[in-house]
Amino acid sequence: FVLDGNKVVVFDSFGNYIKNIKLPNDETMVTFTHDQKNLFIVDKYTLYCFSFRGSLLWSSPIDDGNEKNDCTVVDISIFGNRLFILYREFIDVVDIGELIKSEK
């Protein structure tokens, strides 16, 4: 997986191009990460979950509820079933299972 502006370019293990994955609103992506099943992509204010085939499974706005905080995402990472969201001023830890349940 390679982040290239407003798309993630997918290659196989030999470096052969497979496909592009784009956000539905054509926003510029900030960062992405993946687990064994899904690809998680973030633009400035939304978290998107895609299958490895490129299907959008769900999306969720990223907001800590405090208008005073700068909610611009800098990076994301996954460890176990937790998604770590790094903002400019703080970090948030979200249970992926709970996120999936709330978006269905």
Image (spheres, helix red, strand yellow):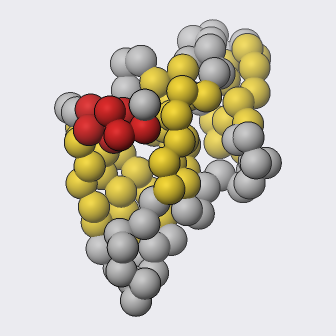
Residue at horizontal 48 percent and vertical 48 percent from the top: 60
Tally of marks: 0
In the figure, residue 50 lies in which quadrant? top right
In the figure, residue 46 lies in which quadrant? bottom right
Which sits in the foreground, 46 or 87? 46
Outermost right residue: 26
**54 vs 32: above or below:** above
User: x%, y% of residue 73?
Assistant: 48, 64
Residue at horizontal 40 percent and vertical 89 percent from the top: 68
Horizontal side, residue 5 vs residue 59: left or right: right
Residue at horizontal 73 percent and vertical 40 percent from the top: 24
Residue at horizontal 46 percent and vertical 24 percent from the top: 38
**5 vs 102: above or below:** below
User: x%, y% of residue 19?
Assistant: 75, 20
Q: Which quadrant: the N terminus? A: top right
**19 vs 82: above or below:** above
User: x%, y% of residue 104?
Assistant: 43, 31
Residue 78, visible in the rendered structure: no
Outermost bottom residue: 68
Residue 41, visible in the rendered structure: yes
User: x%, y% of residue 66?
Assistant: 36, 80
